[in-house]
Amino acid sequence: MLKHILKHDCRLLVVDKVLWLASLLIVLCVGYAVYNGATRAERWREDVSQQFAKAQEALLKQKTIVEEILAGKKSADEHPREGFPQSAQHAATLPPGPLAAFSIGQTDLYPYATSISLWKRDDNLFAKYQVESPLSLLAGRFDFAFVIVYLLPLLIIALSYNLLSSEKENGTLVLALSQPLRLRTLITGKVLMRLAFVLGLVVLLCVAGFFASGMRFNAPGMLGRFCLWVMVGAAYALFWFMLAAGVNTLGRGSETNATVLTCFWLAFVLIIPAILNLAVSAASPVPSRMQYVSSLRAAENTATQIGNKLLASYYSDHPELSANGAAAIPEWARKYYLVQREIEDKTTSILTDYEARLDRQQALVQKFRFLSPAIIAQEAFNEIAGAGLMRQRRFVLQTREFLGSWQAMLSPKLLAGARLQPADFDALPRFAFAEEPLANVANRVWVGVLALLLLTAALFGWSISALRRYSPAS
Amino acid sequence: MTKTIAKKEFTEIIRDGRFRWIAGVLLLMLLVAVSLGYQQSQEIKSDREAAANMDKQTWEAQGNKNPHSAAHFGHYAFKPVTALSYVDRGLNQYLGVAIWLEAHYQNLSSHRPIEDKTALQRFGELTVAWTLQYLMPLLIILLAFASFAGERERGTLRQIVSLGVPGRKLAFGKALGVVAALALVLIPATLIAAVLLAGLKTGESFSEAALRFITLAGSYLLYFAAILGLSLAVSAKVKSSRVALLTLIGFWIISSLLAPRLASDLAERLYPSPVVSEFWEAISKDIREGIDGHNPSDERRKQLEAKLLAQYNVKELKDLPVNFAGIALQEGEEYGNQVFDKHYSRLWALYEKQAGVQQLASTVSPLLAVRHVSMGLAGTDLHQHRHFAEQAEAHRRKIVKLLNDDMAQNAGNQDYDYLADPALWSKVPQFKYSPPSFALVFRHQFGNLLILGMWCAATAFAAVAAVGKMKVD
């Protein structure tokens, strides 16, 4: 019997103009969204590789001059800064996320590159990056994740708000049920048909978008991420179908069904996130950074004033470095470096406190995302695409660690007042962002997918029991 | 007759349990938003005061220091909270809270609150403005979509029309009924917001803030009127209330969800924001090689040397009665200022062009128009940010010049070894921001207000026309 239902429904759907129009709109939206994400990622990738190349080139230039000075071809007086440890700079860059073309997420907010040098501190590692138009940031981006989270449910609602109600209103439901057909089979058939159509569409769009935006499966973890993405999209779609079916089993008219479903959509994509946002900020507030700025400056002021003392105490701890009386590097530079470390020492705890507060907020979001499937899906999409907070934090932590190793290598040379030798240039560390293992990402994502599926299952159980009370007569 | 229709409509609405529920929830949301927004405004305000005080203390506690080192240390200009930011936070989350005023660089504002927020922020934030812009139209649609279509379905429309009431009166009566119901939500919320405004002291003049508040309330009324007019027109025009509801919800989705994103996207495509690295690279290139490659920095320095030597009629720099390093620094600043003016005015012009595209899009989406007006009046938009940034920059130039001049006058031949007396620090003025006048804000928002007014007039006209030509069955 199910086969008949499927066949019949399929015929009806094929001639349904609304279906084709809505699907066409979704296809256009996804096409545009992926194009959008891909161009953005491309610009990002280019910028990152350019910055890296520029920094490497500058280092190489310095190294050549140092070699020429050593060979006696150039005089050190004409090149006073080359070979100074503090003149060496490196670009620490974050490449676009693995599925950057699919989700812009939070990536338009944060810096993806910084130059590393001895002058940098943890707090000013990333300065001067806020040029992105604030108007666009406020509006949000039109990416694939947006189309799935916001628009796909509308297609699903349009397809299934009147699964049973229309038959009832047309008077065909009683007729159909006079055949050896259970109501359960009828609604299952209808949902399955539409589900197959929408899932097929989603998977097709994912595959097409994936290849069209230049991504390939041979990169490590890409297949896994792609599968995760499709799974989240499918689970999200499944949830909305089940919700639509559930509302249908209440036995109200098509109009009421549509209104109820629209209200659910509004609540999930708009109202609950906005309220949760407020609640999370209120529960674990991150104060404005104004106070932090002035604390930093007070620390800077104090540290600058005790600069001489810092230098003296450093040399008394490291007598082997102060042996070099005829230092090539001026004293202010050595002092300045130590002052930066002192500022960092005094203020890192404030900085990490801010970060811990944000982490607590994020943990709250993780906990309460189950209130809205839209939040679950959005968070999961950001994670999978590498467009979320976690990847950004990872980048910041890795650059800080890298800055540490840069300092560990170069600061003894600075404080000994020695120029870098050609071999030192070759030994300089290079930053490469280590992507989080897919397993970790999957670990955070699967809970969300599971929650969506459980919600769907609960709705299913509830609908089955509601169906028993369903009266087919209008 | 109009009164009777309005009364009937109003009674019907408030008897509806669904309305009471939705209106209650909406009112609650408005009250939560207004009180939390207010509390947050107060926090930012005291934060700012504390930070500014601490910054002043730090600045004056520098001890003996070279003036140029002090210029590098610089000042911070903290952005004040505007009186109406508790109603509309606008771009505040996306704009930095402070600008570092240091030697050699005009900086962008830094420490944007959004960076200390989770991804939920991008879904939206429960503020008064958000509730009024996104949710209130839905309530209006819900109240008005069945106005005529519903009567038609019930068969009562024929009777109403048979009474010979003109379309204008009929449409007006229905609208009035809905407005009366809406007033039950809007009046208490407005009163509370107004009382809070009176209690908030942000240093702005109260009459200016009150003017802003009244205009803000007025522009939201225009927005609601436009939605109401549209709803009535659609309800009179289409066959069934079902189609009316679908059309109106579809319109809401386009106006509130799709248009803002697509418009900002189109704006970025037409006028792309610069990549950060390019922005700063172009600035340092212009400083190094001269604007458009004319007059590079080493040449400028040579010219300055020659000019000073001739002016004081000496042969060597060390014989100058003034300190050359101090003069060269100021000369460098002044050249840099030209470069910053060029690049920053380009950046602002770019943002403005982008806003222009959004304004164009607000002919499709009234939400965009009211959003801009609302942020503008609340002082949380780009115009006010620019106003702040420009005053901060003028202050930066003033203090850097003061410090360089001190070095030029008093450093003798000591250059960077010269240490200024701490008395100098207290001579440097504190930054004090004075917000733009209401008249200026109004001028900036005039275009958007006009668009809102046009929306309102067009939908009212459409409603009257549709009711006049409406089919009774």
Image (tube, coloured by chain):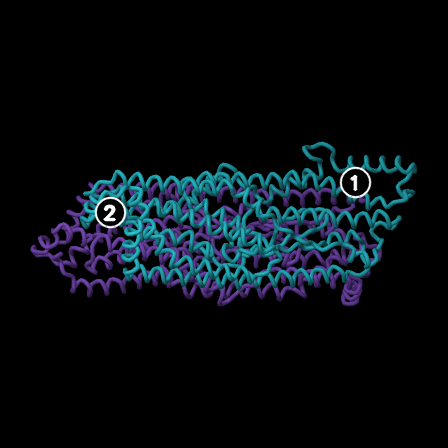
Give the chain letter at badge 2. Answer: B
Front position in the image: B378 or B70: B378
Where residue A454 appears, as percent x and y from the top left, is 31, 64
Front position in the image: B75 or B391: B391
Which numbered disc, 1 or 2, marks the residue closer to the eye? 2
Front position in the image: B294 or B200: B200
Element assignment for label 1: loop
Residue, disc 2: B149
**Would you identify the image quadrant in which residue B230 lies?**
top left
Is residue B183 shown left or right of residue B71?
left
Contact check, label 1 and label 2, Cβ < 8 Å: no
Amino acid carrying mark 2 in the image:
Ala
Residue, disc 1: A74
Q: Is residue A202 visible?
A: no
Amino acid carrying mark 1 in the image:
Lys
Are the residues under badges 1 and 2 in a single subunit? Answer: no
Where residue B56 appears, as percent x and y from the top left, is 72, 60
Element assignment for label 2: helix
Q: Quadrant of the C terminus of chain B?
A: top left
Give the chain letter at badge 1. Answer: A
Is residue B48 shown left or right of residue A467?
right
Q: In the rendered view, would you say A82 is above or below B79?
A: above
**Would you identify the image quadrant in which residue B186 lies?**
bottom left
Q: In the rendered view, would you say B125 is above or below B452?
A: below
Q: What is the drawing colour of chain A?
A: purple
Is residue A319 shown left or right of residue A356?
right
Is residue A201 shown left or right of residue A78?
left
Distance CA(mark 1)–CA(mark 2) = 89 Å
Chain letter matching colour cyan: B
Please tell me which residue is depicted at 88% across the width and 49% down the height of the picture: B412
